[in-house]
Image (tube, grey):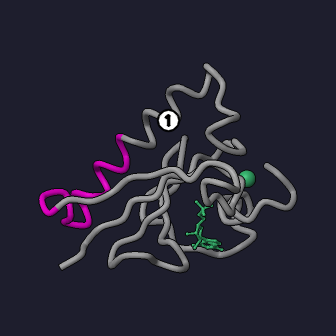
Amino acid sequence: MEKDCIFCKIINGEIPSDFLYKNDTLVVFKDINPQAPVHLLIVPLKHIRSINDLMQEDKEIVSEMIMTAGEMAKKENIAESGYRLFFNVEKGGGQEVFHLHLHLVGGWK
Ligand code: 5GP
Ligand code: ZN
């Protein structure tokens, strides 16, 4: 846990949030400023700063994030219509929260 990290605070309950899904590796919650009708964030419990900080030992976390994104798309009924998954990496890549997260967006008409 990082002291000043907003996503660590969400994960440890310091900032109350509704989790759409939670397991031993990650949580899923809605983006506060949605860019699409469905905009979820898949966030590992482990504080990893960005894709650039991934270690070999984090392979399973990343794989679980992607698998969970697929499951969440089904739950949100956007699997068939289609969706986007993306990581913003560092400031130049649009990253604003420096705790790894995968965006799931979709649900456009
Ligand atoms: P980034 O630009 O770092 O890839 O994405 C960060 C995302 O986190 C943004 O889409 C932003 O709207 C979202 N976000 C920032 N603060 C909060 C918060 O306190 N709660 C939730 N649910 N989302 C947040
Ligand atoms: Zn964090």
Instruction: Check residue 25 for magenta coloring.
Output: no
Work out whether residue 52 or residue 42 is closer to the camera in this orientation and state it: 52
Label 1 lies in ligand 1 vicinity (Cβ under 8 Å): no
Question: Which residue of the protein is positioned furthest toward the top in this rendering?
Answer: 56
Percent coordinates x, y for residue 106 in the rendering: 29, 67
What amino acid type should be assigned to the residue bearing mark 1? Answer: Val
Question: Of all residues shown, which one is farthest toward the left?
Answer: 80
Q: From the image, tell me which residue sits under label 1.
A: 62
Q: Quadrant of residue 17?
A: bottom right
Element assignment for label 1:
helix
Q: Which residues are magenta?
A: 67-81
Camera-side residue of 21 and 3: 3
Residue displayed at 54% across by 41% down: 25
- Residue 20 position (above or below residue 46): below
Side (left or right) of 45 relative to 28: right
21 up-or-down from 25: above or below: below
Looking at the image, residue 77 sits to the left or right of residue 31; the answer is: left
